Amino acid sequence: MKIENTKAQMRKGVLEFVILQLLNQKEMYPSDIIGELKESKLIVVEGTLYPLLTRLKNSGLLDYRWEESKSGPPRKYYKLTELGEQFLSELSQTWNELVHAVNQTTTKD
């Protein structure tokens, strides 16, 4: 088993949660989301991000608006819907429980 594959799977497992957290803070353009993820060492490419954004949009968790760009075509800015905020709240609770359980399990003497 290759460690890089396992590390990539772990990152993918939290990607949806992290993206929802970012969009809970403010509306974002996809390249801004990618920049934030890279800065946090959760490296993702457009080919991963766009299908995820589409899936979240189709699930009613995200909405978007178009904004004219000074240097090219209009840009799509994503934001959480009310349903997305509720979903994120529940996901945050599950995340906190999971982090607690993992820490409790892995820090035993």
Image (spheres, rainbow, N blue to C red):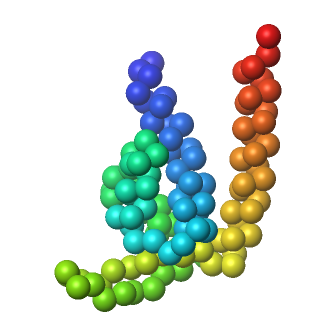
Residue at the left extreme?
Answer: 71
68 up-or-down from 21: above or below: below
Q: Residue 24: horizontal and vertical position, in percent?
A: 61, 68
Residue at 36% of width from left, 87% of height from top? Answer: 67
- Count of marks, rendered view: 0
Q: Residue 23: horizontal and vertical position, in percent?
A: 55, 68
Q: Residue 94: horizontal and vertical position, in percent?
A: 76, 49
In the shown orientation, is residue 68 left or right of residue 55?
left
- Say if residue 85 shows up in the picture: yes
Residue at 39% of width from left, 64% of height from top? Answer: 32
Q: Which quarter of the image is occupied by the N terminus?
A: top left
27 up-or-down from 38: above or below: below
- Say if residue 58 shows up in the picture: no
Residue at 74% of width from left, 29% of height from top? Answer: 103
Residue at 79% of width from left, 33% of height from top? Answer: 101
Quarter of the figure with residue 17: bottom right
Quarter of the figure with residue 47: bottom left
Q: Nearer the viewer, residue 55 or 27?
A: 27
9 up-or-down from 15: above or below: above
Q: Nearer the viewer, residue 53 or 32?
A: 32
Q: Which quarter of the image is occupied by the C terminus?
A: top right
In the shown orientation, is residue 46 left or right of residue 25?
left
